[in-house]
Image: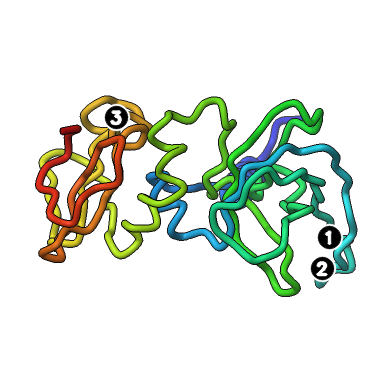
Amino acid sequence: MPLSINGVLCTLTVLILWQAEELVEACSCAPVHPQQAFCNADVVIRAKVVGEKEIDTGNDIYGNPITRMQYDIKQIKMYKGPDQDIEEVFTAPVSAVCGVTFDTSGKKEYLISGKVEAGGKMHVTLCDYITPWESMSPTQKKSLTQRYQMGCDCKIVRCPSLPCAISAPEECLWTDLMMEKQVYGRQANHYACVKRADGSCSWYRGNAPPKKEFLDIEDP
């Protein structure tokens, strides 16, 4: 029996609403420079993940159980955070709601940034800066100990399209996506946005901590 026009419209409406619901539930994050991610985070650590389990955290308004993943970690070094070591990291159970999946073999080291919840628990999402330690550049690793923190009063502004420019002297323009067609290019891997003596901010690249009166972005 052929479908009526009303039946077809009803079917299309259900499909559109279902697709809209899927889009709403998808995780979406704007790219963030590693320095900005460091400054935004409550905790930044280097760690191995050694175990996982799904835990119940209560029920939603419909009575359905709410779960999240608990990853047991072995902290190697803390770059930013509380006085005590972090032993567990919590995240949503699926990537659709920004949950993070880790290798739990204990063989892989990560740089993990995230927020501190009530009770001191560390929570992470796909929007936080989380990356294998071995994939980081030497400059990024060194910047974790001092340079990124020095630049937290600066603001890194992503260039969405050309032409683009900064709107204030304390800003650094992040152009990796436009100039190199990749999110994490030279500026993300090899530069930090650091405040200068006159209060303005500028990209800096160097092996030694920058002098107060440094003027340019390149190595001496």
Q: Position of residue 208 (x, y in %)?
A: 29, 40
Q: Quadrant of residue 107?
A: top right
Q: Amino acid at mark 3?
A: Arg
Is label 2 in a helix, a strand or a loop? loop
- Density class for disc 3 (Cα within 10 Å; few <14, some 14-19, many ≥20) is some
Q: Nearer the viewer, mark 1 or mark 2?
A: 1
Residue appearing at x 12%, y 54% in the figure: 213
Of labels 2 and 3, earlier in sequence is 2
Q: Are marks 1 and 2 in contact (CB under 8 Å)?
A: yes
List the residue tagged with mark 2. 60
Image point 85% across, 39% down: which residue? 51
What residue is pinned by disc 1? 66
Q: Is residue 178 above or below residue 72?
A: above
Q: Position of residue 214 (x, y in %)?
A: 14, 49
Q: Residue at x 15, y 33 (%)?
A: 220
Residue named by callout 3: 186
